[in-house]
Image (spheres, rainbow, N blue to C red):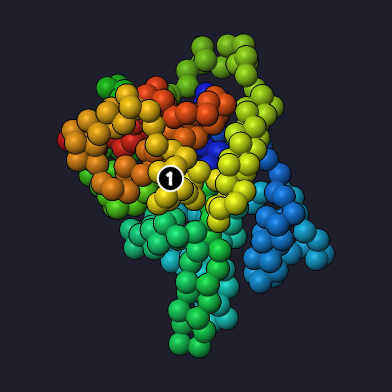
Amino acid sequence: MVGANGVLEVLYGLMVGPPGAGKSLMAACLPGILPPLDSSEALEVSMVASVAGTLEGGRMTRQRPFRAPHHSASMAALTGGGLKVRPGEVSMAHLGVLFLDELPEFQRAVLDSLRQPLETGKVSVARANAHMTFPARVQLIAAMNPCRCGHLGDASLACARAPRCAGDYQAKVSGPLLDRIDLHVEVQAVSAADLILPPPAEGSAEVAARVAAARALQSERLKDADARTNAEIEGALLETHATPDEAGRALLAQAAEATRMSARGYTRVLRVARTIADLETSEAVRRIHVAEALSYRRRSPVA
């Protein structure tokens, strides 16, 4: 998924596929295609690590964080808290990747506590003895099986409740949280024949170069704005830099009406389309970019 288009460089993504399809591996590879932290970003990441007591030797790092908490994590572990308030995983992943594997296995209240940080890029922890605000501008990457048994598409391995079990399993994740995820990607099972195929023509180094070029375009475009990437633009900035051409606007309006898209979903499609255009070094957001962005929106769960 990352090698195919690189869109995950600024946005939230959810991978759905059977066990062994490589979802966790792709998530772990994501930091390798992201550009190194610049000086101001390294300072922010190091400050969070210092508050958490994990800064090694007082040295700043240029490597983007990668955090992968277990699905048994509590709300305090994920968003911060404790007697002596400490940043949680969402803040420890600031300017890096927060990977949530087996997404439906997390407690629903714990997952819903991420809704505000994902929207604002910060998390406020209020306790009787303290009130702290930590940065939480992360790239959320989540993975899940299509159903509890994980073999929904394979009649020989699927459980007796398929396909009804898929709807029940996916419903464990709330709609408002799923609406905040920009890219919903189905990951296909890997067969033995796939393992002996030659490596892809475009490897991680090539993808990383395209991501760096796209980030450079965004940095130049937003140098006078209070934003770093397309994921942060909104309001007038979004209208100025992400408004598609006439054909793209018509397609987006038609899709929004047909799918009853929320206002949040509408703006997120624009951000994804802008990012796809940047990866192609296209100054304009065209219909083809909008169409690809729409293809990543959430599908309805299996009935």
Left or right of 285, for residue 174 = left
Residue behind mark 1: 238
Q: How many marks?
A: 1
Q: Residue at x 55, y 68 (%)?
A: 134
What secondary structure is marked by label 1? helix
Q: Amino acid at mark 1?
A: Leu
Please give left or right for residue 69 compared with residue 163 in the image. Answer: right
> Residue 47 location in percent, x, y?
68, 66
> Could you say which quadrant of the image residue 115 lies in?
bottom left
For residue 150, say whether it is visible: no
In the picture provided, is 299 more to the left or to the right than 293? left
Q: Mark 1 Cα within 10 Å, few/some/many (few <14, many 20+)?
A: some
Instruction: Tell which of 50 and 241 is nearer to you.
Output: 241
Residue sitting at x 47%, y 22%? 190
Instruction: Give the image location of residue 15, x and y in percent.
Output: 43, 36
Residue 272 rendering spot, x and y as whole percentages: 44, 36
Q: Identify the residue at horizontal 32%, vertical 42% (top origin).
A: 266
Give the quadrant of residue 108.
bottom left
Relative vertical location of residue 281 with respect to residue 174 in this rendering, above or below: above
Q: Position of residue 147 (x, y in %)?
A: 31, 38
Picture residue at 50% right of the left edge, 35% below the top = 275
> Is residue 240 visible in this depiction of the protein?
yes
Front one among 227 and 17: 227
* Quadrant of the image containing the C terminus: top left
